[in-house]
Amino acid sequence: MDADTRTSNTPARKTTFAPLRVRSFRYQWPSDLTTSFAFEMETLILGWYVLVETESVLMLTIFASLQFLGTLFAPMFGVMGDRVGHRNLLTAMRAFYALLALTLMSCAFLGVLTPVLVLCIAAMMGMVRPSDIGTRNAVIGEIMRGNQLMGAMGIQRTTQDSARIVGALTGAGLVATLGMAYAYVAVASLYILSTVLIFLAGRARSDSSTPRPARAADAPSAWKDLGSGLAYVWNTPHLRGVMCLAFLINATAFPLFHSLLPFVVKDVYGASQTTLGYLVASASSGALLGSLMLSHFNTFLSPARLMIIAASGWHLAILVFAQMPGPLSGAIALFFGGIAQSSGLVSMAAILLRHSEPEYRGRVMGIRMLMIYANMPGLLLAGPLIGWLGYPMTATLYCLFGLACIALITRHWRQQLWNRDSMSNTR
């Protein structure tokens, strides 16, 4: 059997890093890692730039929301992946990131960079970037067995978590030391490297080892493919329940945990960009620990139950963080929030990949990315609320609302998501 197939005939030993024995995954993992590094550096650098130049939390929320603009088109990216191949699509997406980073770098060197230009580039990046995680997950779903998915997703998740640690600290340090233009040399270089690695992974993979989903010749139009994917999710109770939970956490938890941290650091704590890097690194350290623990102990966990418990724990951690008086105590709350975040998101992705029909996998992950659109109303509502009520009270209201909705989701889909013998809790 080919070295890049899902597994060999001899069962692999259960180790934390067992998924890296798959050759294609060994190429994809560093590509995902470098992409995630660039994402985190870019978000921190540009978010701080917009906040400092405009001195407006509203402009910061607009910048953050633009990064999720493409979530409306994420299902179509899933259709495209099902038709042309998820790995081919991922290569094209990462080449586009590199092109935009090179453009912004050139503007910085020429001294023509403005907040308006940054917002325009963020909007273009936002058309594509939200679909990156779903597409990379769909590739993993093609090359891993069902009982390996939780472990593989845990390892894959470390690319985002470790990137937030190193990327946040590096991004803050590079801008402070070298300036915006030279910091973007590093960002553009990471995007170029990630493109090369995912391209090599595509060439190294044996086509015969991966089941091929439906392509353009199998359906009259992409819109029909999309409609069938939406119908499939709607008519599959456990998938519909997971999507509702995904929408909720993107509306309530994500804006407070990520996008609004620059405001908390600057206006609540009165601290610098370096402190922002430390807070992001603290949250990501917890997420990295959670990912590694999931990868190691995945055979003992019930995925759907863990997803619900982790989502609740994430909201509780944010609720505690909102009451913290300074960066040190806030960093501790963010660390535990990071553990809950990664536990919930990894188990959610594993459920969607393992319990979706292969021919619908790309569309299911595209619809999952569509749920990220909830970030936009969550962020745009948070801006005025913070100006009116302040950050602690706004965060408290968001978290209490989120916890109440999690309880309702659990009650409504109890049979599919909470019962121990449900399909979603298969280990």
Image: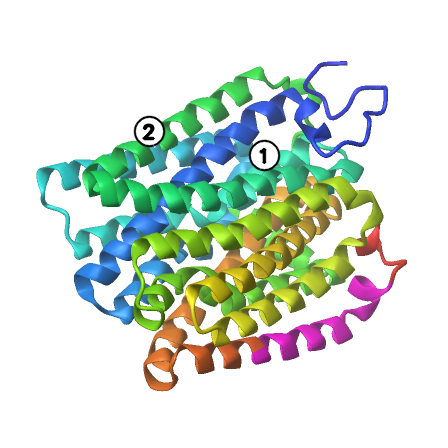
Query: Is disc 1 surrounded by few (<14), some (14 to 19) or many (20+) residues within 10 Å?
Result: some
- Helix, strand or loop at disc 2? helix
State the mark number for residue 189: 2
278 on left or right of 22 = left
State the mark number for residue 215: 1
Badge 1 or badge 2: first in the primary sequence: 2
Q: Is residue 157 above or below residue 69?
A: above
Q: Is residue 73 above or below residue 175?
A: below
Say whether residue 104 is visible: no
Residue positioned 42% across, 52% down in the render: 278
State the mark number for residue 288: none
Residue 24, how many percent across, how many down? 61, 23
Residue 273, how many percent across, how many down? 31, 55
Q: Is residue 250 magenta?
A: no
What secondary structure is the stretch in magenta mostly built from? helix
Location of residue 227 (image quadrant): bottom right
Q: Which residues are magenta?
A: 400-419
Type of amino acid under label 2: Ser
